[in-house]
Every structure is written in C-alpha cells, then in structure tokens.
C-alpha cells in the first residue's frame, strides 16, 4: 500500500529525522485546511471524504483528511479507561489494525479520481480528545460520523462539545452528492441555532436554494421574524416557512419537510440542553441524527 501518512500531535512516536520532517509537513497542511474529513471509523470513511470534497469545492477551499484513534499504549488515562480500550480490541481490532482499515479505505477512495492523488492522510493516535484538538482546532468545518465504533462516537462528542466546531455528519449509506442543492435550516430563535447559521454562512452563500423552517412558531410570528432578520444580516437569500407539527414530534416534522422538499442538507443548532440530558430526554437533535436520510450540518 502506498498511502502517505503523518502521526501528528500527542501520538507522534520517535522516528528518523527525515520522517519527522515529512510528518510535520503533512500535519501542517492538515490543520490549516478549510474542511477536514476526520476518519475514526473505516465504515464511514468514504462518505466522509466524498462530502468533505464537495464542501471544500463549494467555497473554493482546501480539504484535508486525518485518522484519529484511541491507543492505550500512548494514553495518559485512568487504569479503567485503558482497560476498556484494551477490551474493545476483541471486536474492533488493535489501534494499528483500525488505522490500517481507515488508510485502505482512504487509498481506495483516492484511486477513483486522479486529482485526489496529492491528498495526504494525517494520523493521530493516543488520547482521543487531544488528538481531536490537534487535528481540527483551526478547521472551519469538520466532516465526521456520529455513530460507528467507539472512536467515532467519542470523536463526534469531542468535536461538538469540546471543540464546538461546525460539524457535517454524513447520511447512512451512500452519499448522493449535490450537498448544497437545497439547504433546509431548522430554526428557532436560540443561541445554538444562530451560532450554527453564522458558522455555516460561507456554505449557505453558495447554496442553490435555502429554506428556513420554523416549526410551531409563536402567535406573534417571532420565529419567522428573527429568521428573516438573520438572513438579511448575513446577506443570504432564502424562503422562510412556518408549519405546525400537529401530532408529530418536531424532529419528525423537520425530516418529513426535508424529504417532501427534496432537501440535500439539513442545518441545525445541536443539543440545546447538552449531550447527556438530550440522551435522557430523547430530544430533537438525537431524533434527527438517528433517523436522518441526508447530511446534517450542526453546531452546539
């Protein structure tokens, strides 16, 4: 296999000087990319790479790819956490094996188009939270799965809640393309929703169509009013639509609307109440992630 990789950040082991110099070069390119495909799980690597490529192309920006993974031999953690990581090797393989699977998926993806030949794969293993910080701290948009192996779930949590990044989650199965053909924004005048729209403004500016969806607006129409004001302030054109959920949940209402209107991407503010409380209450973000059929862009 002829992939090129870098062991960036806290997992970088001692190596020959030339290798270190080259690894540092790859890592430098990665951390300054506009869009980063973060690949903790080989099962979702291709869809993450496809979507990241589209997202970078939409703004004429740069794309990078990086693998991150927990490695108990390189972790500074409690004994219980290290034991848990060792136990998962029975089902998911060793850290080296998990990386090899991701690297193989990356190399296979590169072979599909000749212009991908210059894209390099960065690699960071060790304490996963520090690896995530090392790889995506300066990135404007991170493409990553929300479900999958343990690395994928932990990575998603770190990106969203610790790094507070704009995250683009691929749909289950194959990505259909045309990311910004029709972006539906699930809107409620709350801080986390506003942060999401502001962070995504560069991508929204290139969208073919934008629809802001206000579910169960108040009698004074405040959801629609604030949506129009935000679009105006950001210099964006879009339709603002209000609908009632009726006997459906808000999450179901949003996804039904997105399907009916042939949306290609959904933008939301994620987890108003925080990750663990949302898990207990089964709120909107959890429903959307569990039942999504299209890419979801979000920010906490």
Image (tube, rainbow, N blue to C red):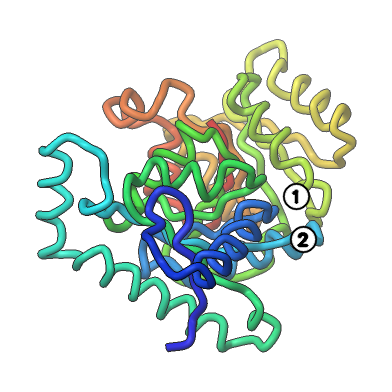
Please give left or right for residue 174 compared with residue 193 in the image: left
Looking at the rendering, which quadrant does residue 145 occupy?
Answer: bottom left
Point out residue 11 in the picture as x, y percentages from the top left corner.
Answer: 37, 54
- The secondary structure type at the circle numbered 1 is helix
Point out residue 231 in the picture as x, y percentages from the top left corner.
Answer: 82, 32
Residue name at image x 69 percent, y 37 percent? 199
Point out residue 34 in the picture as x, y percentages from the top left corner.
Answer: 70, 53
Question: Residue 58 — which label?
Answer: 2
Residue name at image x 51 percent, y 31 percent? 245
Pointer 2 local density, CA inside 10 Å: few below 14, some 14–19, many at least 20: some
Q: In this view, does 50 lie above or below 268?
A: below
Frontmost residue, 182 versus 43: 43
Question: Residue 203 — which label?
Answer: 1
Please give left or right for residue 258 compared with residue 42 in the image: right
Cα gap from disc 1 to disc 2, whole angstroms: 7 Å
Q: Is residue 155 above or below residue 92?
A: above
Point out residue 243 in the picture as x, y percentages from the top left corner.
Answer: 62, 32
Q: Earlier in the sequence, mark 1 or mark 2?
A: 2
Please give left or right for residue 243 compared with residue 164 in the image: right
Frontmost residue, 277 versus 183: 277
- The secondary structure type at the circle numbered 2 is helix
Q: In this view, does 237 lie above or below 183?
A: above
């Amino acid at each position: 296999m002829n992939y090129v990789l870098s062991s960036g950040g806290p997992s970088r082991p001692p190596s020959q000087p030339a290798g270190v110099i080259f690894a540092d070069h790859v890592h430098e390119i990665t951390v300054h990319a506009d869009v980063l495909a973060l690949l903790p799980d080989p099962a979702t690597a291709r869809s993450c790479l496809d979507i990241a490529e589209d997202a970078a192309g939409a703004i004429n920006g740069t794309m990078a790819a990086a693998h991150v993974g927990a490695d108990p031999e390189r972790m500074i953690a409690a004994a219980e956490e290290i034991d848990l990581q060792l136990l998962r090797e029975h089902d998911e393989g060793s850290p080296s094996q998990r990386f090899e699977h991701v690297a193989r998926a990356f190399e296979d993806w590169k072979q599909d188009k000749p212009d991908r030949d210059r894209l390099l794969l960065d690699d960071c293993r060790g304490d996963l939270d520090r690896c995530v910080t090392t790889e995506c701290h300066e990135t404007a948009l991170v493409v990553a799965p929300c479900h999958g192996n343990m690395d994928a779930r932990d990575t998603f949590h770190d990106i969203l809640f610790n790094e507070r990044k704009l995250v683009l989650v691929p749909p289950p199965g194959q990505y259909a393309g045309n990311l910004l053909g029709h972006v539906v924004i699930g809107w409620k005048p709350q801080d986390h929703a506003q942060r999401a729209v502001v962070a995504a403004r560069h991508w929204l500016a290139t969208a073919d169509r934008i629809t802001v969806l206000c579910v169960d607006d108040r009698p004074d129409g405040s959801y629609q009013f604030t949506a129009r004001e935000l679009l105006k302030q950001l210099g964006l054109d879009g339709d603002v639509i209000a609908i009632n959920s009726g006997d459906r949940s808000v999450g179901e209402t949003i996804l039904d609307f997105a399907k009916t209107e042939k949306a290609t991407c959904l933008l939301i503010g994620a987890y108003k109440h925080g990750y663990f409380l949302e898990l207990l209450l089964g709120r909107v973000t959890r429903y959307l992630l569990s039942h999504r059929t299209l890419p979801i862009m979000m920010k906490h």
